[in-house]
Image (cartoon, rainbow, N blue to C red):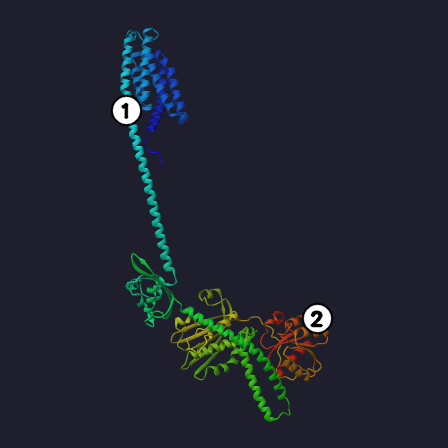
Amino acid sequence: MNEPQYDVQRVRERLVNYTLYTGAIVGLPIFLLTTARAADPFSVQRLPVDLAIMVSAWIILLLGKRVPYRARAAFLLGVVFLSALNQIYTQGLYGFGPAAFLSLSAMAAGLLGMRMAFAMTAAGAATMLLAGWAATEGWLSYPADMQQQHLSFNSWFQQALGIVFYGAVIAIILGSIHRTLANSVAELTRRSRMLEESNLQLEREIAERLKAEEALKLSEEKLSSALHSSPDSIFVIAMDGLRIREVNDAALKQFGGDRSAVLEAVFPALWEWEPAEEAARFFHALKEHGSVHSYEAQARCDSLGRRMLSISAEIYAVREEKHAVIVVRDITQRLELEERLRQSQKMQAVGQLAGGVAHDFNNLLQVIRGYLEITLDEPSLDPVLRGNLQEVDRAANSATALVRQLLTFSRRQQLQAMPLNVNTLLTHLLTLIRRTIGEHIELSTVIAGNGLTILADQQQVEQVVINLCVNARDAMREGGRIHIATTSHEFDAAYCMTHPWAREGAFVEIAVSDDGPGIPPEVLEHVFEPFFTTKPAGQGTGLGLATVYAVVERHHGFVHLDTVLGKGTTVQVFLPQVTIAIAPRLTFEAGAKVNLSGATILVAEDESDILKLMLHILESEGCKVTTATNGKEAELAFLSHAGSFDLAILDVIMPKKSGAAVYQSIRERKPRLPVLFCSGYDFGSLGEEIENDPYAFRVSKPFTRNDFLAATAAMLNLGRA
């Protein structure tokens, strides 16, 4: 707290300092003037006194507050006393001496109080009496015209009495004024301090109130921000009448309408409850329990259609008026995702089951088809029996196709990328497409020139085209036209900037267009989502376009969809174009005549029936065969006769050691020995080294006898070359 401004002592100090400044400054010209009058004996006598006074004043001023106030005041009184004494000495009763003694009393009263004033008065009177005695005794001399008056002690005594009387009066008056002023100043100071303390208290209260108001404002802003930034719809309603009092932005966006209209509405009337009595049940539960959490209700909104809502509410009181905060969350999408997840898990379980069944079924089909071929090759077979067996063979072929579909569904087939000419692929696929889409759909094609080569899995690319055609067919129930076109593109950075869906590079485009009704905007953003379908229940899985998207992404391509309501839809598939020729893998002519006589072959197969079949086929062609029922046996057999084998035929998955592990053992000793892998579904575990090995090939089960022999002959010829 600052010191009050009303302080008598401070005024005294300032008065002393100002007087000292004045004396120090004015003393210099007085001293110079006295020096100039050096011929005057009285002036000469004053020179030492004036010089001492001036020098002392400057010393005290330079020391400043290091000289106590009373010392400075005493010095000032001493200066005045010396001046008065000098006047008495030089001019006697006719100078300023008596007046100086009276001023000394006044100054003492003002600076040091009444007691000091009386002391100065007494000192002045005593000095006058002492000077009078000295003058009458002849110790003091004055000019001749003033000498006679100064020799009278009575004159000096009268002056002393005057000093005593007037000095006492001045001391009493100024002392009283000083005391009254000091008391007034003390009271004023006390009140000033009280006022300042009151002001400080008021300032603290104002600061606390402003802080509380700022905190309240900040709290309201946070509450408002939280309210309006919530993705859930939030309503504040009055329980008396259920009218809406406050609403957040999400609610306005979700249920439509402007704020003023919503704030006038009754909450249950915002949407159509299904069933209608659901609203009454909800508010009955709210009033009974005071709160409701995650109450699920079905509602129909004008802007959103039928939705599933999760509603939570709690009642609170404001000035004895009951209100409720109601939070509405749209859980339609969540429930749909949960249903899709259940469907996905179901399909995953079915896929795992299908994959396992397909693998086992493959082995059975391998044995059935193998022995059927051997039997049908018998020239003496009864014609009727031959016909029956041929029907069995056709059924086995159909079963083989079904198994491949099951393996594709279960995703147990790895991506088998190879160079493909898109035009050739589509040309071979058109017959199947026409049979698939039906006669009520017209099919047209525009095939671009040569050079449309991609690196892709043929079966998966064919599946993409078929899915797009089936999707287009389903969009035209009453018939229409499907158009398939191929071309190539080179997209640069500038094009991709204006077409965000594109990617830089060279791509081959396969476009499938229809003249159906087009896709509505609310459906368009979901078409590539798994399990999303607009078809009636039981007529679609929602995997068609999702599969297209997944396959294209897996091939490092992209999909673009363009649709116009009432005119049709075009789906463009872009796959990276191959610009560098890739050497083709080993191929063989199925059914060609082969000569395997004398070949020594290692065969490793864990299925005994298939091993017997392969042994029968190879030995019937004159081969010398060493068999193994697991990977460890195959490795030991090879190590025992490493130099005698012309070919190794290995199952991919075997007990104890896999086909890939046996391959590594073979390569360590015979880098150029041909190896033929056989598998019902999984070649993905072979690894990149085997994929790029020109002396390794694979054949899928179930294979025909002729395909197996042709592949074996091709591998033997490769090893002999």
Position of the N terminus, as image quadrant, is top left
Residue 244 drawn at (x, y percent): 30, 63
Can residue 459 be seen from the camera position used here?
no
The residue under label 1 is which amino acid type? Ser
Res. 483 mark: none
Q: Amino acid at mark 2?
A: Arg
Q: How many marks?
A: 2
Q: Secondary structure at mark 1?
A: helix
Residue 639 position by quadrant: bottom right
Residue nearer the viewer, 497 or 389: 389
Label for residue 176?
A: 1
User: Looking at the image, is mark 1 or mark 2 nearer the viewer?
Assistant: 1
* Residue on which disc 2 sits: 669
The Cα atoms of the two marked residues, 1 and 2, are separated by 131 Å
Instruction: Specify whether 274 is left or right of 578.
Output: left
Which residue is rendered at x = 70% and y = 72% of the image? 670
Q: Nearer the viewer, residue 294 or 29?
A: 294
Q: Quadrant of the C terminus?
A: bottom right
Location of residue 279 (image quadrant): bottom left
Q: Is residue 280 left or right of residue 464?
A: left
Judging depth in this view, the residue of 365 and 514 nearest the camera is 365
Of marks 1 and 2, which one's residue comes earlier in the chain?
1
Residue 338 lies, in percent from the top left, at 44, 70
**Height in image: 402 above or below 163?**
below
Is 447 on the left or on the right of 327, as rendered?
right
Q: In the visual, does 158 lie left or right of 658?
A: left
Q: Could you classify mark 1 by the number of other residues whose Cα lies within 10 Å: few (under 14), some (14-19), or many (20 or more)?
A: some
Mark 2, residues whose alpha carbon is within 10 Å: few (<14), some, or many (≥20)?
A: few
Query: Is residue 213 positioned above or below 261 on the image?
Result: above
Provide residue 377's location: percent of width, then percent of height: 63, 88
- The residue drawn where x is 43% and y is 71% is 336
Query: Farthest residue in the front direction?
Result: 288
